[in-house]
Amino acid sequence: MSQLLDVSTIKRDFPIFERTINGQKLVYLDSAATSQKPLAVLDAERAFYVNHNAAAHRGAHKLAEEATEAFEGARAFTAKFLNSPKDEIIFTKSATEAINLVAYSLGNADAGSQFQISQDDEILVSEMEHHANLVPWQELAKRSGAKLKWFKVTDQGRLDLSDIDSKIGKRTRIIALTQQSNVLGTINDFSEISKRARSVGSLFLIDACQSAPHLKLDVTELGCDFLTFSGHKALGPTGIGVLWGRKELLDSMPPFLTGGSMIEMVTMESSTYLPAPRRFEPGVPNMAQAVGLAAGLRYLTEIGLEKIQDHELALTKVALEELKKIPELKIVGPEELTNRGGVISFELEGIHPHDLGQALDQYGIAVRTGHHCAWPLMRRFNSVATTRASFYLYNDLEDIDELVSGVKKAQKFFKGNK
Amino acid sequence: MELESLYQEVILDHYKRPKNKTLHPNPMVQVHHINTSCGDEITLNLSMKNGKITDLSWEGVGCSISQASASVMSELLHEKSRENALTLLGEFQEMLQSKGAIHGNEDRLQDGVAFAGVAKFPARVKCALLAWMAFKDAGSRIEDHNE
């Protein structure tokens, strides 16, 4: 049996749990959308503005020096979090921007460059992707003439790799896949895919938005070239995302957004660009947000990602068992715990997810309802919308009880009105 | 805020037994509207003759609020003149966007006043307006056809 964390102590670090919702205790089961923030993150952001605020990488004054140190310190900690060298971490405003950065950079490559994508090439994604890891690739395919291919998803909610031979070949230029589905909770095993990517010389990007906040990741073991995640799902503030990339690739890729502080030299006619990471960080960066994110990652590290994953698995196990006891309820996604994270999507016969979500809100329970920005995946499961509960380190078994009894109460409410 | 104020019996009734929820053939126009934030969908068929609505039928998937609102609207607007229908649409919309200040005139909006409670749930206003916006769009297209 997996070990549970001491949630009552953890909750004290998250001020939002002091408030009530509709007069009830807040049961927050929407961390897959965005996580709540511990005081450490809020304090770190505030301390940056209060004590060190100035434009990083500019100016000869003391504050500018301190701001640079704080920002670069955040980079160093994020690098440690992923076990990468510091210069392989690029701060963006979001994971969405990070994925667009890679897609646009590849699309900007000169003819003949190693990154050029043309009409004979293929881009590979999956049916399981969040729109943020699908639409940028659709657009790159459209601009370059390359063909967009995708892995299908099995009825059990797993990546269907049975046709991997026809999906990954010598035309494959980039593979972009989510590590954990934001709808199904499925965790994808990339060992075979990364091996194939390497053997055909394809780039491999992992969307780790749903995994990095919950699993111990090590980019030296994942066999990928790029990895992205968003700060706000990992206890950090909004407005900060992370792109990790292999240095030798980043240094030779064309820039995406251009402007100040990413240049080496500028004349009226043309410019040359700095190496990574600054090559991809034009303008004054989101310094306070980066500092806040590092505080969030430090918080996660101090508790321990392995322990957090164990905790979430224990909650998921109970939640799956209890939810499955409701006859009208159907789980959408894997029902076994192997390679599974703390995200549970379900449908409830006779009650639309928005109506269920509304009723749960009345009881103080926050869940996500709708298509979860993964419309193709929803179509795959013939579903218009699901209700999704997602767990994090501040959830406990009481929250699961509240969810299950909330669903039952909602059933009674809607059935009572015949 | 109580659930009962949002989910009036009238609404749940229309949701379970929707009116005119079968697309009638050969409409003058057909429109398809989606609530992009949640995925609710409606297809609406509209025909008019001599400035009057002669047929209004629909098909859709979505929450009780969006589906019931389509049902109520299809009943209310049947055989209304274009001007009258647009005035009713305006009143319904005004009620929904009033944050609860306007309760609606039951003589005019009929079952539509059951949606007054939705106005207090800003996230659901779009659900209640989905069908009405589809109707507005369809109506303007018929205008383009000069009927």
Image (cartoon, rainbow, N blue to C red):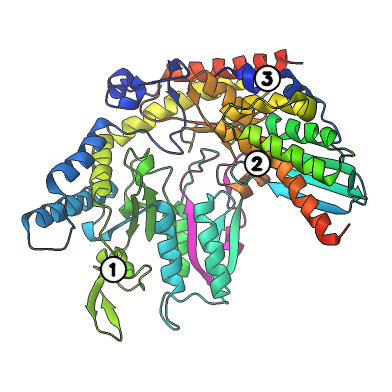
- The x, y position of residue A13, in whole percent, is 27, 26
Residue occupying the point 38% across, 37% down: A214
Looking at the rendering, the stretch of residues picked out in magenta corresponds to: A155-183
Look at mark 1 in the image and give the residue it sits on.
A279
Residue occupying the point 58% across, 74% down: A145
Cα–Cα gap, marks 1 and 3:
55 Å
Circle 3 SS class = loop
User: Do the residues marked 2 and 3 share a common chain?
Assistant: yes
Whether label 2 touches label 3, CB < 8 Å: no
Type of amino acid at the residue the image marks with label 2: Asp
Type of amino acid at the residue the image marks with label 3: Pro
Q: Nearer the viewer, residue A181 or A384?
A: A384
Q: Chain of mark 1?
A: A
Look at mark 3 in the image and give the residue it sits on.
A327
Count neighbours of disc 1 (C-alpha within 10 A) and say few if under 14, some if 14 to 19, many if 20 or more.
many
With respect to residue B40, does A124 lie above or below?
Answer: below
Circle 2 SS class = loop
Q: Chain of mark 2?
A: A
Image-quadrant location for residue A203: bottom left
Look at mark 2 in the image and give the residue it sits on.
A155
Image-quadrant location for residue A17: top left
Q: Chain of mark 3?
A: A
Circle 1 SS class = helix
Whether label 1 touches label 3, CB < 8 Å: no
Q: Nearer the viewer, residue A329 or B16?
A: B16
**Which-is-in-front pick, marks 2 and 3?**
3
- The x, y position of residue A146, in whole percent, is 57, 72
- The mark nearer the N terminus, 2 or 1, is 2
